[in-house]
Amino acid sequence: MRAIPRCPVTGVPATRHIQPISGRLISGLWRGAFGVSTDRQLAGVDHFDLWESPCGLAFFEPMLEGDEDFYLDLYRRGDFHRALSAPRIARAEFRRIAELVRPGDKVLDVGCGEGGLARHLPHAVYVGLDPHCYANAGEFDVRNETIGAHAALHPEEYDVVCAFHAIEHVADPLDFIRDLVKCVRPGGRLCIVVPSRTSPLTEIPNFVLNAPPHHLSWWDEGALQAVAGVVDLKTEAIEPVPFSFDSLIYWMSRCAPKLTGDRYFRAHWTWHCALAWGWLVGRACDALFRVPASARPSGLLLIARKPP
C-alpha cells in the first residue's frame, strides 16, 4: 500500500495521488531535451510520485533538488541566463516590485541570477543572493550565499525581500520561506513569484523543466495563501504575472497536442512527438508573434506583509 506523504508546506497529508512517473523516463527526457545527464542525481530513484495537498500545492515525492553540477550544465546548455537577463524583456514582476519599493528601501533578491531586478531599483539599496555568481552581475551587489546563511547574519534587515521563480526548486519550501521571512524587518514585505500550476506550463506533455530535479512543487493561489499563513504573514495581494522571458512556453502549449490532464508525463511515442512538435512550431511562433493579452498568466505574485 502506497504511503501518503505530508504537504511540505502545511504538514497535512496529501489528498490525491496524481500519477507515478518513472525515474528512467525523467532521466531520458532531460537527456533528450537538453543533453543533461541526471543519472548520477537520480541514481536509485525508481519512480517519482506527483501528489496534491489540501491547500492546492502539487509536489513530487521524493523532492530531490538539483545540485550545483546539474544547474551549471543545464544553464550552459539551455542558455537560460541570456533569456532571463535580456534587456529587451521587461519582466512584469520587476516593474511591479519597483512600484512597491520606496526611495532608500533596502531590498534582498534571492536567487537573483545576474541581478536583473537591480536595474529597476536605482532608488533603493539592492542586495542579491545566488549560489552561482555570474560575471555579468559584477555591477551589482550580488553575493554567493545561501538564504539560510544570509538570514543568520542579517535578521530583520530588509524592507522588501523577493524570491522570483525560486521556491519551486527547493526540497524544503517551508524552511526556505522561513529564512526569507527572517530577513524582513517588522512591517516589511515579502514578494514571491511562482509559475502558476494552472498556466499553459502544465499543458505541455512530457515537459521536463516542470519535473525533478528542477521543479519540485507546483503552486496555485491556495498554496500561496497557505504558506503565507503558516509563517504568520498577512497576504496583501496575489496577482497574475503575464508571460515575458517565458513566452516560448505559451506557444509550445498552444502548438502541442492536448494530452495532459489526468497525467503530465508518459513514456509513449505520441507524447514524445507531441513535445517535439510543440517545441519546433512553438519556437517559430515565438519568433513571429507576441503572446496575446488574453493569455492566461504565466505566474503568480504573492505580496505579503510582516506584522509590525
Image: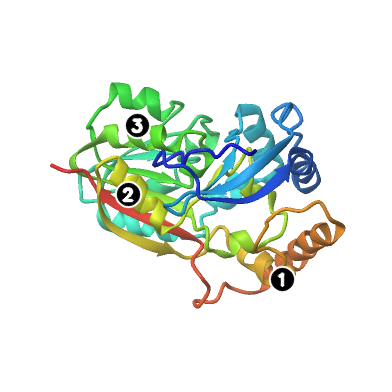
> On screen, 224 above or below 46?
below
- Label 3 crowd (10 A; few <14 / some 14-19 / many >=20): some
Q: Is residue 63 left or right of residue 174?
A: right
Q: Is residue 104 left or right of residue 150?
A: left
Give the residue drawn at x 55%, y 53%.
86
Give the residue drawn at x 50%, y 29%.
131
Viewer-closest of 233 and 182: 233
The image's colour scheme reads rainbow
- Which image quadrant for residue 151? top left
Determine the CA span between mark 3 and mark 2: 23 Å
- Among numbered discs 2 and 1, the one appearing first in the sequence: 2
Give the residue drawn at x 41%, y 64%.
240
| Dot 1 amino acid type | Cys
- Among numbered discs 3 and 2, the one appearing first in the sequence: 2
| Dot 2 amino acid type | Leu
Residue 45 image label = none
Q: Which numbered disc, 2 or 1, marks the residue closer to the eye?
A: 1
Viewer-closest of 217 and 240: 217
Viewer-closest of 19 and 36: 19
Determine the CA span between mark 2 and mark 1: 37 Å
Q: Are marks 3 and 1 in contact (CB under 8 Å)?
A: no
- Label 1 crowd (10 A; few <14 / some 14-19 / many >=20): many
Q: Which residue is mark 3?
A: 179
Q: Position of residue 308 (x, y in %)?
A: 13, 42
Q: Position of residue 24 (x, y in %)?
A: 79, 39
- Among numbered discs 3 and 1, the one appearing first in the sequence: 3
Q: Position of residue 203 (x, y in %)?
A: 64, 63
Q: Which residue is mark 2?
A: 121
Most distant residue in the right direction: 269
- Which image quadrant for residue 289? bottom right
| Dot 3 amino acid type | Asp
